[in-house]
Amino acid sequence: MRKIMLLFFMLSQVVSAADINQSGAVNQVDLRKHDIVINNRPYKIKPGLSIDNRSELKRGSIVNFVLGDNKVIKQLEVRPNMQIMLPDINN
């Protein structure tokens, strides 16, 4: 029983330490405050982060990102020529 518990603890530490790769649609972005909302979830962008295809980053853009600890995005790539139409913010 102890071996199983120890193995579970070791595996859970490995999984929690790993970065998470995700994709989604941008709802809002404010690069001055390092804030971005993707799939209705707020995240922080690591200050000084180089963003691939930054000129295409806007509401509705499809992005790939690597999420580190504390909801901080460590890598952000805008998928070129991919965008979805989102409903107006005021609705």
Image (cartoon, grey):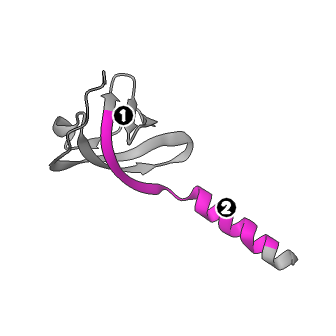
* Residue 67 percent across, percent down from the top left: 46, 48
Label 2, label 1: how many angstroms apart (C-alpha)?
28 Å
Question: Would you identify the image quadrant in which residue 76 lies?
Answer: top left
Left/right placement of residue 84 relative to residue 43 reads left
Residue in the image at 23% along x and 42% along y: 61
| Above or below for 2 versus 21 | below
- Residue furthest left as drawn: 81
Q: Quick one: label 1, few (<14), some, or many (20+) residues within 10 Å?
A: few
Question: Residue at left 59%, top 63%?
Answer: 15
The residue tagged with tag 2: helix, strand or loop?
A: helix
| Span shown in magenta | 5-27
Please check the rendered image and state whether residue 78 is part of the magenta-colored stretch, yes or no. Answer: no
User: Which residue is label 1 attached to?
Assistant: 48
Callout 2, which amino acid? Gln
Please tell me which residue lies in front, 43 or 24: 24
Foreground label between 2 and 1? 2
Which of the 4 image quadrants contains residue 27?
A: top left
Q: Is residue 23 above or below residue 84?
A: below
Q: Secondary structure at mark 1?
A: loop
Q: Amino acid at mark 1?
A: Gly
Q: Which mark is residue 32?
A: none
Could you say which disc has been placed on residue 13 in the image?
2
Which corner quadrant of the image does residue 88 belong to?
top left
Residue at 26% x, 33% y: name it.
87
Percent across and percent down for residue 42 are 45, 34
Q: Earlier in the sequence, mark 2 or mark 1?
A: 2
